[in-house]
Structures are given as structure tokens and as C-alpha cells.
Amino acid sequence: SFQEILLNCETCDLQDTIIYQLKKRYADLQMYTYVGDILIALNPFQNLSIYSPQFSKLYHGVKRSSNPPHIFATADAAYQGMITFNKDQCIIISGESGAGKTESAHLIVQHLTFLGKANNRALREKILQVNPLVEAFGNACTAINDNSSRFGKYLEMMFTPTGAVMGAKISEYLLEKSRVIKQALGEKNFHIFYYIYAGLYHQKKLSEYKLPEKKPPRYIDNDTGKVMHDIINKESYGTQFEAIEHCFQIIGFTKEEVHSVYRILAGILNTGNIEFAAISSQHQTDKSEVPNMEALDNAAALLSIGSEELQEALTSHCVVTRGETIIRTNTVDKAADVRDAMSKALYGRLFSWIVNRINTLLQPDKNICNAESGMNVGILDIFGFENFTRNSFEQLCINIANEQIQFYFNQHIFALEQMEYQNEGIDAVLVDYEDNRPLLDMFLQKPMGLLSLLDEESRFPQATDLTLVDKFEDNLRCKYFWRPKRVELCFGIQHYAGKVQYDAYGFLEKNRDTLPADIMVVLRTSENRLLQQLFSSPLTKT
Ligand SMILES: Nc1ncnc2c1ncn2[C@@H]1O[C@H](COP(=O)(O)OP(=O)(O)OP(=O)(O)O)[C@@H](O)[C@H]1O
Ligand SMILES: *[C@@H]1O[C@H](CO)[C@@H](O)[C@H](O)[C@H]1NC(C)=O
Ligand SMILES: *[C@@H]1O[C@H](CO)[C@@H](O)[C@H](O)[C@H]1NC(C)=O
Ligand SMILES: *[C@@H]1O[C@H](CO)[C@@H](O)[C@H](O)[C@H]1NC(C)=O
Ligand SMILES: *[C@@H]1O[C@H](CO)[C@@H](O)[C@H](O)[C@H]1NC(C)=O
Ligand SMILES: [Mg+2]
């Protein structure tokens, strides 16, 4: 076992030893390996026949050493731990993008659902639909993984004291909203846009949702001109659409709600097609107008708002000074920014609404068990560490989140473990590990950490992405930060996983993430109840 290797390995290079063992096991298609409480899972990139109900049975309530290492054993350990010690449990999944975290999370949910067999079959069915549904809205194709999570997800499965599953709850973090309006080269928008496009095409409902049949909307179009061809011909899109409709239905969304969701998605796609042109009058040159009303009218109709009001809110804004309201016009660039901010806000709030709605539909039935006596197993699956050719604000956020998880791992694998050895007087080799606390401090400290500096700079109207990088350079004087010569908006960070270079272009705007009040006001007048709700209720954490 690895424990033996660790304890007997005074001179050998630990990392080489582990990698050698993992490679050897991988060659025999042994994907799983234990190191203490930790399961190392390699990505087989092929379908292994080791996840059937027979395997769930095999790993049910037996000693870990009775069977080869398996992800079901990890799920089983959490479940048995919860029952035995009457204590909530948590499984944390970490790894770079494409490593197989989300697939692993599914397998854990699958096995926990098997273990928590309530008589309530309907509930089990519902819980199994949660991941596919939120992932259709929160996953997308990236350069690294064509099913990449673009949000962080914490799924809690709730059980009665006797271990029957009684409900579930999701929390979502940091959805990559900017993907709605623009994607990097070779990447795509969130899956759901292609799924509904294909589904509505096959149902001959594109015109009902004011989606064109020839040229795809700008938000999902790309240079190759192949997008529409794919939407029409790729069988998987159509199948996924049906799967999503099925998920909505099983979990308990009403037909009316699903219809509203589709209208909002189609509304977002039409919003993206609104274009602006400059008009110059005698006194002003910074006014914009919408030369072609089609997209605007379509968006307004789908969102059930007035098209004139929408145009107003896009091309002008109110300023209140000394109790007086003055209307200022928006330049073409400003109007386009407002349009995109609106699309991002619509998508982000729609996503949160879906998550909240799922939580309501899956909350424990008070007649079965009061929530206090219940226990849960939580599964954390976030977006993995990323290093693209161009890394922007989103990659920085994702990598900071992974840095935080790495810190948690270090604490549990090394720091706490070694303390325990020492307390028990076990003479184990102290393993040298890289403590990433100093780097986390560089990010998170107030008021001089990178994120605080970013917030501060975001509040200065005259600030630019360049002044931001200057500010970083002036204040972050440590070995984890550097500024490459000759690349203006670039800075580098020495992460736990290695060096990553970031391009600060657009950082301030993305961090501000503002939605003009004028847009809020218009969206609140929507006759679509769901939309009204999205912009009326105060934002909660999820
Ligand atoms: N246990 C597995 N069996 C078969 N294939 C797998 C398994 N785990 C992962 N894969 C394959 O690897 C791909 C990527 O896995 P996954 O989406 O889970 O990565 P991830 O770690 O969640 O990445 P990201 O951080 O980008 O979300 C899957 O689409 C699947 O093809
Ligand atoms: C695994 O099986 C699924 C369906 O059973 C199939 O769609 C997929 O392409 C397979 N993946 C691999 C890597 O063989
Ligand atoms: C992506 O993941 C979802 C669920 O998370 C799954 O239903 C779907 O089949 C996957 N898609 C691809 C293309 O692998
Ligand atoms: C454009 O989309 C097609 C099909 O959807 C995809 O194969 C291709 O990689 C994309 N190209 C770019 C440059 O984004
Ligand atoms: C990120 O990519 C760059 C360029 O390919 C490479 O030099 C660097 O080592 C990579 N960093 C990580 C953490 O993988
Ligand atoms: Mg994932």
C-alpha cells in the first residue's frame, strides 16, 4: 500500500515513486488508488464496465481492503461514516480541467442513491436528474474539455438517521457568465443554447421563438460557419434536448416554467443580435440608435417587455443629481456594453433561479423527517485548474478557487496528518510539501491582496486595465507575482500547479459586472412572471 511506501521510503523520491505506481496501474486499467483517506482517480477516457449495480452491491458496507480501490468505496465510506458517527460528511474532488471530477461526482451520487434506497423511488429518480440539468446550463465546450464545468457546485444529499435519502440541495458558485456573450477561439457557449436550438428546430418551433433558421445568432456563431449545420445534423444535440425536457419534467418544473425558461434563452440570443449605430446631431455626437429593429423587437417580445422601453434603456441612462433626473445618451460602445451586461444578468439569474427551484422541489418532506435530525453527504465539484493560451479574469477566479482547495488538501494530507503522527509518537518521515498559504494571502489579504487591489481599481472611473497591472506590480512584491517584459497587459502567477500568465484585458469591466438600473426597471415590467421575479427579488447567495 502507499502507506508502506510512505513509511519505508526514506531515501527514494516520493513523487517519482507515486507516479511510477500510478502509471503501472493505469497500464492495467486500474484507475483507482488509495493514499490514506484519499482516492486518486485517473481518467480512463473509455467506458469501463465497473459502475453497474453489481459493482454497487460489491462495494456496499464491506471493509475497504476486501475489494480493489474504487470510487464507490469512497462514497460508501462517507455514507457509513455518516450513519456510524451520526455526522455530516463531505467529499472534495480536485484536479485540473478534464481530469474527470464531474464524472466522479456523478458516480458518487449514483452509489449514494443506491445506498440511500428509500421506498421513495420518485425522489431517487429526481436526484439523479439534478446533475444533468444544471450541467446543461453550466457546462460548455472548452479547449481542454468538451464538457467542462463553468461553475462550482456543492451538492448535498440529505438522509434520515436510518440512512434513507430524503432530499438534496445544490449551491452554485461563480458561474462564468461572460461565456454567454463571447467565447474564446475554438470554444462554445453553454450547452443549453445548442440543445434548445436543435430541439426547437426538430419540433419546427424556431419561428415561435424567433430564432433564425439560416444564420445562427451572434452569441453562438463562429467563424467556421458550421454552427447551424451542427445544430441541425448532430444527433446528440437533439437527444440532449429531449433529456433536458425529461429532467425538467421529472424534477417537477411546470410546463409553464419550462416555457418561460426557453423564452428567456431565446430572448438572450435575440438580444445579442441588437446592433447600434452612431447618430450625430448638431449638439451631440455621442448618441446611438438601433438601425434595424428586428432583433430588438424579437428580444422584447420574447422577454414580454416593451420594445421602445428596451431601446431607451439600451441607448440612454438616467442620472440623478440633486434630486433632478437627467437623461444621458449612450455611445455605440456603451450601448453594446449595456446590451451584453443585460444578457449576462439574464443568464446568471436564470441559472440561480433554476438552482433554487430544484432546491425547493427536492427539499425533504417534513412529514418524513424533520430537517434537524437528518444528515448529509456533500460533494464538492468545481471547475478545474486551467492554463490556456490566453488566460483572462475567469481563469484567475477559477485558479484561485483551486488554489484554495489545494490549501485544504495540504492541510489534511500533510499538516494535520503529520501532527497526528507526532501526537501518537509514530516515527514517520516528515514529508516536505509546498505550503501555498503565502500565495493565498497574496490573493486574499485586505487591503493589499490582489483581489482587494482589483476591487479598489474597479471603483476609479479613470482606471484602465493597464493602471491595474501597474498597481499590482507596485503592491504585490513577492516571488509569486511577476510582470513579463514587452507584454503590456500581462502578469504572471506562480500557482501550486505551476506558472500561469494572465492577460488583464477586460479585468476591470468583468470585475465591476454592473447592470444599469434602467435595464432592471424595464425587466421588472415584464409580463413574464418568471422574468419579473428574477429582477424583483433580492439576490441571495445562490
Ligand atoms: N470514470 C470515467 N470513465 C470514463 N470516462 C471518463 C471518466 N471520467 C472522466 N471521463 C472522460 O473525461 C471527460 C472529462 O471529464 P470531466 O468532465 O468529469 O472533467 P472535469 O474534471 O469535471 O473537468 P472540468 O474542470 O473542465 O469541469 C468526460 O467527458 C469523459 O469523457
Ligand atoms: C461510452 O459510451 C457512450 C454510450 O454508451 C458513448 O456515447 C461514448 O462515446 C463512449 N465513450 C468512449 C470513450 O468510448
Ligand atoms: C456532459 O455531461 C452531462 C451531464 O453532466 C451528460 O448528460 C452529457 O452526456 C455529457 N455530454 C458529453 C458530450 O459528454
Ligand atoms: C466553430 O464551431 C464548430 C462547430 O460547432 C467547431 O467545430 C469549431 O471548432 C469552432 N471554431 C472556432 C474557431 O471557434
Ligand atoms: C502553462 O502554459 C505555459 C505555456 O505553455 C507553460 O509554460 C506553463 O508551465 C504552464 N503552467 C501550468 C501550471 O501548467
Ligand atoms: Mg467538471
Image: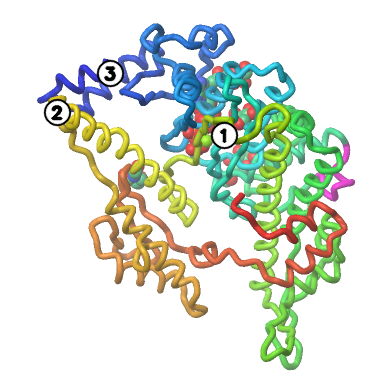
Kindly identify the amino acid type of the residue bearing the numbered disc 2: Val
- Dividing the image into 4 quarters, which one contains the N terminus? top left
Quarter of the view holding residue 255: top right
| Secondary-structure class at tag 2 | loop
Identified at 40% across, 74% down, the residue is 467
Give the colour scheme shown.
rainbow
Disc 3 target residue: 21
Q: Residues within 10 Å of mark 2 (few under 14, many from 20)?
A: few
Disc 2 target residue: 429
Residue 45 visible at all: no
Compared with residue 69, is residue 305 higher up or lower down, i.e. above or below?
below
Q: Nearer the viewer, mark 2 or mark 3?
A: 2
Quarter of the view holding residue 292: bottom right
Residue 197 visible at all: yes
> Of the residues under marks 1 and 3, which one precedes in the sequence?
3
Identified at 74% across, 54% down, the residue is 268
Left or right: 413 with respect to 137?
left
In reply to whether residue 207 is colored magenta, the answer given is: yes
> Which region of the structure is painted magenta?
204-213
Disc 1 target residue: 156
Q: Point out residue 399 in the picture as x, y percentages from the top left corner.
A: 42, 48
Left or right: 325 with respect to 39?
right
Q: Point out residue 344 in the picture as x, y percentages from the top left corner.
A: 65, 57
Identified at 51% across, 13% down, the residue is 48
In reply to whether residue 262 is colored magenta, the answer given is: no
Whole-angstrom CA distance, mark 2 to mark 1, is: 37 Å
| Secondary-structure class at tag 3 | helix
Q: Point out residue 342 in the picture as x, y percentages from the top left corner.
A: 69, 62
Q: Point out residue 163 in the picture as x, y percentages from the top left corner.
A: 57, 21
